[in-house]
Image (cartoon, coloured by chain):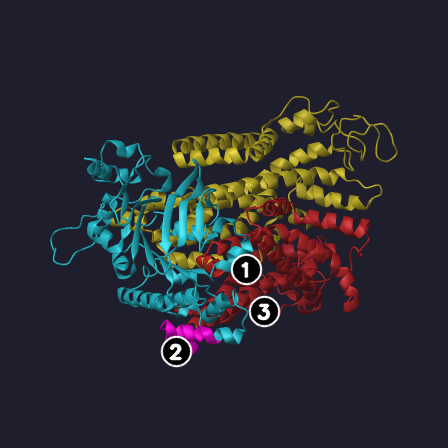
């Protein structure tokens, strides 16, 4: 077993509400091995993105990473880093691809210069040298006619090209960790496949560790080694990709899998989960999934679910499974 | 005409009561007002004091002794407000300037008729400055409040019509707006007052004509957006009448804009009046006029400052309190921040 | 594109006609020419003197329809105040002042330079100062610095500009004696001394409102996604502000500011009159005090015309410069 590049211990991110501070990421512990792809899965509003932003210490105000949260990256204790030290890490050792490339690129700066900035923030090289690197990068990520694209503005590029610019910006400094937050959500299906292919190639070539955030289990199947399922700020199940996709145990994960249309099962109807993730201040007291779970019984509403292990790193947190294991 | 100001007071109080009843039934507005009260208690109390002074200065009747040495028959038959009756301005005066709380006149040192009683001293004519400043309250609320009360319905009707129906109606309203908007506000205001005359009604009309454009444009823009909103389209699909859509779906969503615009318009108008007063076309007895009269007194030696101070402080306090409330209201009512709070 | 420009120009022309119509209604239909004459030459002149004055100043015709001409004669419609008003304004033939018979065009020529020498630096300086402080405040948002500046802005916004002028002249001019309290000089070396006081006071007077407005724009920009991207790249707060936020925020700020430029020509009524600067603002105040209707309506017309032209130019240059606008 290779060593962990990222280790989150009891991560807690809170936001103020009229009723006091509410944890949108609550007690999350995840470890990500070097060179592997970890997928963070869940519906929107589950705290996946917030977990990733906390790792980069980019939680937007007035949100806050609570004391006692352990964030270790490459054996560095991230919460204790000074601001300049953190800045030296961001975009250099760890970088991030955002979901909406439409708004995530600065509309009034030429796209090439935005990538040049990413390089020159961390390396003392001339503008021309950086520009040459950017052109190579553009070539590499499949942007046609890099010379000309270098000096255009974001709104003139298609969604796929913009996402390629984002990716080239993220990998420009050859980071050890790449966080990809829903990298394909905003794109057309055909472009999605191309971008996934590109990410896979980059992973192979650069050996980058990837933290992939998605709600799309098809993407998980394409790319991930290990999967962590989150619901309402909590981890509910984690396992190797194959294990999770074939023999998921938690009702929520089963629900997610059931919501995928299967070929050859025409007419059977989807087993999607009813309702949506409630807002953070309405999360139930006991098991957070209890308000939507179809295997509900007595302790679910009041007590936090127990950890149930199935071996080979497959763990789930659920009262129903605990009962099953005990009997 | 004795009854007119009193009727206005009754009408305003009745309007306030109806507004209160309507608001009480709406949870969103009662909560917003409660939040405003929590955040801006002090400002609201001060605004309430101003309103009280203005009301007391409007409720008036004839009779009672006009002044202790009442020889003037005309003065005796003039209606006098509660404030007038408290201060008795005809007798509560000196010969000329006196400092606040002074016992003797500012020039010549002759003893005063009311030593130590003029909180803000007296002006060149010997009138009590505090009394004059209080009289300005009514004028300021008239300029700011009454004008805005006239402007908002007009702007709302035109803005709604233009935004909701579009087409020809929109073309006409937009043309009128862009014509008025292309003339600098102050110049248009001056032109109107010069042509119409300088009475309180004329000045209010002039302020109204220049003031409605901005709010009308805002209403039109919002209505255009709301018209395309899903729930409005849905209501339309269900066969709701135009009137129902406008009153049920559009106006409630404009309400926060109306409230905020009211506050901003109010302060803008009160401040604009000082400029008009400087140009000699303001309202009689306004703070602007007092400030304008007082500015030359600064070059006297020793300086006569209380005249300027009285009007300035009252004006500043009122505008500041309204500004503070407007600011808080924007936070409380803004749909974007509302969503964040959820 | 071409069609758009033509349409925009046509609409601008229609707006100019609308402004002229408004002026006609105000200055000829509502204000009675007889009143104007009386105010100009006094109550006790003979009837002939009034008539002569009205002829000299072009108030002697009927308003809209001249009944002396037949129905089919063009003179029925052209020999009227309405037609004459439109003709003179559109050909920039402004005639003479109602008050002292000086050609108005002459006045405008003389007043433009003093006005601009006050308003241009005032405008530029307010903009720079406002943007600078707003940027600073946005950088320190949600801290005590931000809070303190916001409180200051709120206080500053609640003071009437007349008070700023009076207090500024008293403190800086009379008490500290740094600058002469009023006056003007055509010599550029001397004029700075006269302009310093009104400019300083003007910048202070507009400070509160400007900073608050610009701060809102900046804060809105800092909440956008591209700022998060920049921070994820490793940009520091200061770099994010200057390189990313400022550039984006300047677009809405400059748009709002560009439309204020035509008003600079008209000068500042309050400042010019108060500090004895013989610009267009001071001329307008004189016209107000002297009931000089012809000068007043010319001033209104000129400023509206400049505004409409500036608006058209901004609209067109926007369409040319910003492909996002062009596409939509």
Q: Residues within 10 Å of mark 2 (few under 14, many from 20)?
A: few
Residue range corresponding to the magenta coloring: A132-151
Image marks 1 and 2: residues in contact by CB distance under 8 Å: no
Q: Tell me, by letter, which chain the rendering colours yellow.
A: B
Instruction: Tell me whether marks 1 and 2 sit on the same chain.
Output: no
Decide whether residue A242 is among the magenta residues.
no
Q: Is residue B191 visible?
A: no
Picture layout, residue C309 above or below residue B296: below
Which residue position is annotated with label 2? Answer: A145
State the mark number for residue C54. none
Query: Which of the marked residues, 3 or 1, is nearer the chain's N terminus?
Result: 3
Of all chains in the rendering, the one displayed in cyan is A
Left-right relation of C122 to A253? right
* Residue at mark 3 to residue at mark 2: CA–CA distance: 59 Å
Q: Nearer the viewer, residue A231 or A222?
A: A222
**Which class describes the residues within 10 Å of circle 1: few (<14), some (14-19), or many (20+)?**
some
Q: Position of residue C303 (x, y in %)?
A: 59, 63
Q: Marks 1 and 2, how far apart in space?
A: 35 Å
Is residue A144 a member of the stretch shown in magenta? yes
């Amino acid at each position: 077993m290779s060593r962990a590049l990222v280790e989150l211990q009891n991560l807690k991110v809170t936001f103020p509400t009229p009723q006091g501070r509410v944890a949108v990421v609550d007690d999350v512990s995840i470890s990500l091995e070097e060179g592997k792809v970890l997928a963070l899965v869940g519906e929107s509003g589950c705290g996946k993105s917030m977990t990733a932003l906390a790792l980069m210490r980019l939680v937007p105000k007035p949100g806050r990473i609570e004391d006692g949260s352990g964030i270790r990256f490459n054996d560095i204790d991230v919460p204790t880093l000074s601001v300049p030290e953190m800045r030296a890490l961001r975009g250099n050792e760890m970088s991030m691809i955002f979901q909406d490339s439409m708004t995530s690129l600065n509309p009034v700066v030429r796209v090439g210069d935005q990538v040049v900035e990413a390089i020159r923030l961390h390396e003392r090289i001339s503008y021309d040298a950086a520009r040459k690197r950017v052109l190579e990068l553009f070539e590499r990520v499949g942007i046609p006619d890099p010379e000309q694209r270098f000096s255009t503005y974001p709104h003139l590029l298609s969604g796929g090209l913009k996402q390629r610019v984002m990716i080239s910006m993220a990998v420009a400094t050859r980071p050890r960790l790449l966080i990809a937050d829903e990298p394909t959500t905003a794109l057309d299906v055909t472009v999605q496949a191309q971008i996934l292919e590109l990410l896979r190639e980059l992973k192979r070539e650069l050996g980058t560790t990837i933290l992939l955030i998605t709600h799309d289990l098809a993407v998980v199947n394409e790319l991930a080694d290990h999967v962590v399922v989150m619901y309402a700020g909590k981890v509910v199940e984690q396992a190797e990709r194959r294990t999770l996709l074939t023999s998921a145990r938690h009702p929520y994960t089963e629900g997610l899998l059931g919501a995928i249309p299967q070929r050859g099962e025409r007419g059977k109807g989807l087993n999607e989960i009813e309702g949506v993730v409630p807002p953070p201040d309405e999360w139930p007291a006991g098991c957070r999934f209890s308000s939507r779970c179809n295997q509900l019984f007595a302790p679910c509403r009041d007590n936090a679910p127990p950890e149930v292990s199935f071996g080979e790193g497959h763990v789930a947190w659920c009262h129903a499974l605990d009962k099953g294991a005990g009997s | 005409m004795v009854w007119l100001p009193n009727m206005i007071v009754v009408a305003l109080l009745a309007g306030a009561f109806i507004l209160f009843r309507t608001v009480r039934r709406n949870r969103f507005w009662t909560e917003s007002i409660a939040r405003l009260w929590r955040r801006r208690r002090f400002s609201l109390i001060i605004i309430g004091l101003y309103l009280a002074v203005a009301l007391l200065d409007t409720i008036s009747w004839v009779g009672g002794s006009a002044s202790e040495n009442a020889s003037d028959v005309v003065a005796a038959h003039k209606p006098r407000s509660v404030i007038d009756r408290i201060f008795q301005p005809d007798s509560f005066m000196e010969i000329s300037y006196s400092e606040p709380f002074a016992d003797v006149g500012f020039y010549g040192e002759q003893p005063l008729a009311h030593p130590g009683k003029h909180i803000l001293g007296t002006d060149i004519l010997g009138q009590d400055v505090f009394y004059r400043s209080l009289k300005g309250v009514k004028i300021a609320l008239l300029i700011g409040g009454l004008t805005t009360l006239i402007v908002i319905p007009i702007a709302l009707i035109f803005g709604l019509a233009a935004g909701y129906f579009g087409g020809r109606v929109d073309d006409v309203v937009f043309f009128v707006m862009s014509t008025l908007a292309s003339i600098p506000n102050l110049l248009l205001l001056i032109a109107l007052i010069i042509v119409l005359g300088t009475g309180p009604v004329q000045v209010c009309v002039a302020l109204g004509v220049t003031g409605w454009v901005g709010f009308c444009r805002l209403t039109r823009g919002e209505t255009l957006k709301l018209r395309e909103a899903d729930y409005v389209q849905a209501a339309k699909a269900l066969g709701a009448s135009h009137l129902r859509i406008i009153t049920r779906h559009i106006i409630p969503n404009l309400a926060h804009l109306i409230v905020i615009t009211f506050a901003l318009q109010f302060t803008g108008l009160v401040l604009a009046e000082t400029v008009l007063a400087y140009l000699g076309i303001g309202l009689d007895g306004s703070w602007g006029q007092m400030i304008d009269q007082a500015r030359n007194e600064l070059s006297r030696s020793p300086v006569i400052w209380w005249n300027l101070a009285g009007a300035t402080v009252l004006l500043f306090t009122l505008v500041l309190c309204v500004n503070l409330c407007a600011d808080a209201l924007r936070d409380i009512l803004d749909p974007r921040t509302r969503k964040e709070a959820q | 594109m071409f069609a758009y420009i033509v349409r925009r120009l046509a609409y601008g022309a229609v707006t100019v006609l609308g402004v002229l119509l408004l002026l006609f209604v105000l200055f000829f239909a509502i204000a009675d020419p007889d009143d104007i004459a009386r105010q100009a030459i006094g109550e006790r002149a003979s009837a002939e003197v009034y008539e002569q004055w009205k002829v000299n100043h072009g108030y002697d015709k009927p308003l809209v329809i001249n009944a002396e001409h037949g129905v089919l004669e063009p003179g029925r419609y052209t020999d009227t105040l309405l037609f004459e008003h439109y003709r003179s304004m559109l050909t920039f033939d402004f005639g003479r002042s109602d008050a002292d018979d000086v050609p108005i065009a002459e006045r405008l020529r003389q007043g433009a330079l003093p006005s601009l020498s006050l308003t241009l630096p005032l405008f530029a300086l307010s903009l720079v100062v406002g943007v600078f402080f707003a940027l600073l405040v946005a950088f320190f948002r949600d801290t005590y610095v931000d809070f303190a500046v916001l409180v200051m802005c709120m206080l500053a916004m609640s003071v009437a500009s007349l008070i700023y002028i009076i207090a500024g002249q008293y403190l800086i001019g009379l008490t500290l004696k740094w600058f002469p309290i009023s006056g003007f000089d055509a010599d550029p070396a001397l004029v700075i001394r006269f302009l310093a006081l009104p400019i300083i006071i003007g910048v202070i007077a507009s400070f509160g409102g400007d900073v608050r407005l610009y701060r809102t724009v900046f804060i809105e920009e800092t909440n956008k996604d591209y700022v998060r991207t920049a921070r994820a790249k490793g940009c520091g707060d200061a770099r994010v502000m200057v390189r990313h936020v400022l550039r984006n925020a300047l677009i809405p700020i400059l748009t709002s500011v560009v439309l204020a430029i035509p008003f600079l020509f008209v000068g500042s009524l309050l400042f010019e009159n108060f500090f004895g600067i013989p610009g267009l603002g001071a001329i307008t105040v004189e016209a107000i005090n002297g009931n000089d209707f012809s000068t007043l309506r010319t001033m209104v017309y000129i400023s509206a015309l400049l505004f409409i032209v500036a608006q058209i130019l901004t609209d067109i240059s926007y369409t040319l410069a910003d492909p996002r606008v062009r596409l939509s």
